[in-house]
Image: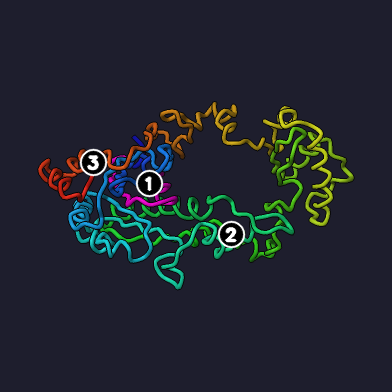
Amino acid sequence: MGPLQGFKIIELAGIGPGPFCGMMLADMGAEVIRVDRPGGNPSAAGGHDILFRNRKSIAVDLKSRQGVETVLKLCEQADAIFEGYRPGVAERLGVGPEQCMARNGKLVYGRMTGWGQTGPLAKTAGHDINYISISGALHAMGRAGEKPMPPLNLVGDFGGGGMMMAFGIVCALLEAQKSGKGQTIDCSMHEGSAALMAMFYGLKANGLFSDNRGTHMLDTGAHFYDVYETKDGRYVSIGSIEPQFYELLKEKAGLHVEAFGEQMNPSLWPQQKQQLEAIFKRKTRAQWCEIMEGSDVCFAPVLGLDEAPSHPHNTARASFIDVEGVVQHAPTPRFSRTPSAKPEAMRTPGTHTRETLLAFGFSDAEVDHLLEQGAIAQL
């Protein structure tokens, strides 16, 4: 089930953004086969990694000639393959674009790195925090007078990396259906995070955004777009940008017109924010929810991971699901005609080696020989 049903995609197992990309594609119905190393994948430790859900796992030793040949044979029937190695590693292993696409001219080959396949940083190590540093994203995040605040690893790894890679693969698959030819995708996390900053580069060009962190409307500079602590030590979020929503905020919070009359005067924002901080501390989060939630104030309680799944809106839409005892997000986005199936939990690396190879045309004797040689492993 799902809009990508019928597509076969090989995932050369990696960490973070790679598994996220695989999860997105598998959630949409693609048959994603994860090629793990024999003995397990360190990034899948713990047994409940949601990023590894919904996939079949085969264990292959890519340092052996027969292991490499196994992957190349899979490529003959696959629609796409993707990896997250440093530039040149896949080629050294024997599973680079040229080697794989020689077996299947329609194959889409996705390459995801932090810095891209070229450039002075291409072969150096890095992580999300580094990639979003050179895209301009990290510098823009944080409060006035404070250092930049990393937004977990959502912007580089997942938004700019895994999500962009999934988008690129689907784009290339659509093009391949027209041209009959595959191609290579160079997806870099620093460029993906730069794309996520498109609106702010545009605002900067129009003189509406600067490097003065925490002084703008959307970066906690404005009093009407921020997080506030409540009486019980919890938090609520306010996003009353539009004038009509701001008027409703003033009404619901009982704000004095003289102090909060000028909404878009940045020179007043610090003192207006100070007053709002005091006002929100007068009531508990539950009390503010009773007053504002469900209105056009643009309000929401700030929920922790334990609370979010049971929020009434999330329960009404079944936004979170339970998969073998682990609460996690439901597949998204939703489709009217080709809905996604309920995901399956991650499986131990090597669980599906034999059944997958047989489905791809290997004989039992060939699989037995590969197992004897140590080129593959079966749980």
Q: Is residue 251 left or right of residue 109?
A: right
Name the mark on residue 271: none
Name the mark on residue 137: 2
| Residue 174 location (% of width, % of height) | 33, 51
Q: In this rendered view, identify the residue nearer to me: 95 or 265.
A: 95
Residue at x 52%, y 59% (from the top left corner): 195
Residue at x 67%, y 55% (from the top left corner): 142
| Residue 207 location (% of width, % of height) | 69, 65
User: Which amino acid, mark 2?
Assistant: Ala
Q: In this rendered view, identify the residue nearer to me: 53 or 80.
A: 53
Q: Earlier in the sequence, mark 1 or mark 3?
A: 1
Circle 3 crowding by C-alpha within 10 Å: few under 14, some 14–19, many from 20: some
Q: Kindly state the secondary structure of the residue where label 1 is placed.
A: helix
Q: CA distance from mark 2 to mark 3?
A: 43 Å
Q: CA distance from mark 1 to mark 3?
A: 21 Å
Q: Kindly state the secondary structure of the residue where label 3 is placed.
A: loop
User: Which amino acid, mark 3?
Assistant: Gln
Q: Earlier in the sequence, mark 1 or mark 2?
A: 1
| Residue 223 location (% of width, % of height) | 76, 48
Q: Which tag is nearer the camera, tag 2 or tag 3?
A: 3
Name the mark on residue 378: 3
Residue 194 in view in this figure: no
Q: Earlier in the sequence, mark 2 or mark 3?
A: 2
Residue topped by disc 1? 22
Give the residues in magenta: 5-25
Residue 173 vs 48, above or below: the answer is below
Residue at x 81%, y 52% (from the top left corner): 270
Quadrant containing the N terminus is: top left
Q: Kindly state the secondary structure of the residue where label 2 is placed.
A: loop
Is the Cβ of the residue at disc 1 closer than 8 Å to that at disc 2?
no
Give yes or no for residue 19 being in the magenta stretch: yes
User: Which amino acid, mark 1?
Assistant: Gly
